Image: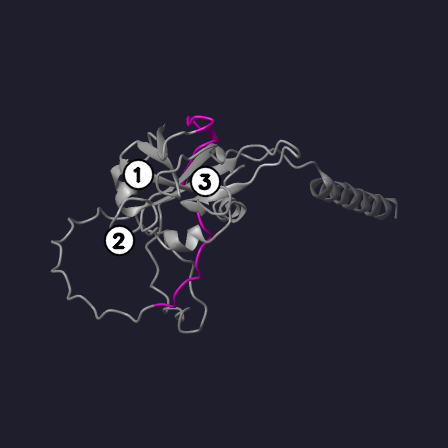
Amino acid sequence: MKTKLRFTQRFFSILFIAGLLVACSKDGVDGPIGPQGPQGEQGPQGPQGPAGQDGEALGVPGPQGEPGETGPQGPQGPQGEQGETGPQGPAGPQGEQGETGTANVIYSGWIDSELANNVISTSASFSIDAPLMTQGIIDTGVILVFGKSKPNPVTNDTDVYGIPIVFGAALQQSHYFRAETAGQLDIVVAANEEGEPVGVPFFGEYRYILIPGGQSTGGNSGSDTLGNKTSHTDLSKMSYRDILEQFNIPE
């Protein structure tokens, strides 16, 4: 009986020890990973798969590539023959007339008379230097000369008249000018009655205005020349003040 009991105890002791060994083998700490082995040879390439669908055909364009460099410019070709002259177009409407300019108008200040205070001869004259009065102005321009009366002894007033002019009544004097030589104006006064002296000249100062351009009609007294657009005859009908305003000339 005792022998059978000991056998049973030993059997269970062996089972217990075996269980402990199994438990220790499962719950023990893993050891370190060993070094990686060498890479094996690459295997053979597999068969090519089927082609994918065309992106452009599906309406999805691919990305645009970068623009290429500009190539060198080729040589210029020969100039072609000149074409025929086209027909002349219709004339445009006439523009408005511009304002009268003063860029070419020449004028002097007031110049004292060199005539005697009492001329006892039938006529007298003196010359005024006009260095800008060219032969071209004499031939095709307009020459205006004005005389200013001596001051009135009572009112000290003066009057300006265009020359040539003829005074009648008690004065009986004629005043005119000659422009025969470039750069020189001649002022002349004469008695209206033959054989009578001139007496006291009416004008004490003179002034000239020169307008270049125009077309000559002959003569050189300044009474028969034409300006660019306005004849001397038209200007001679204008007062001294109107002439100043017309050409923007200061007093």
Closer to the observer: label 2 or label 3?
Answer: 3
Is 48 situated above or below 100? below
Residue 137 sits in quarter: top left
Q: Relative to 215, is 13 on the left or the right?
A: right
What colouring style does the render use?
Answer: one colour
Q: Is residue 119 left or right of residue 160?
A: left
Residue type for callout 2? Thr
Disc 3: CA contacts within 10 A as few (<14), some (14-19) or many (>=20): many
Q: Is 116 a magenta residue?
A: yes
What percent of the width, then of the height, locates residue 78? 11, 53
- Amino acid beneath label 3: Phe
Magenta span includes 80? no
Looking at the figure, which quarter contains the C terminus? Answer: top right
Can you tell which quarter of the image residue 197 is in?
A: top left
- Seen at 32% across and 54% down, the residue is 44
Residue linked to disc 3: 146
Tell me the residue that label 1 is attached to: 179
Location of residue 184 by image quarter: top left
Q: Disc 1 marks which amino acid?
A: Ala
Q: Few, some or many C-alpha atoms within 10 Å of disc 1 (few <14, some 14-19, many ≥20)?
A: many
Judged from the image, the secondary structure of the residue bearing numbered disc 3 is strand
| Residue nearer the viewer, 44 or 54 | 54
Which span is picked out in magenta?
92-118
What is the x, y in percent for residue 73? 21, 48
Residue at the disc numbered 2 = 217
Q: Secondary structure at mark 1?
A: strand
Q: Position of residue 104 (x, y in %)?
A: 38, 41
Compare marks 1 and 2 and give the one earlier in the sequence. 1
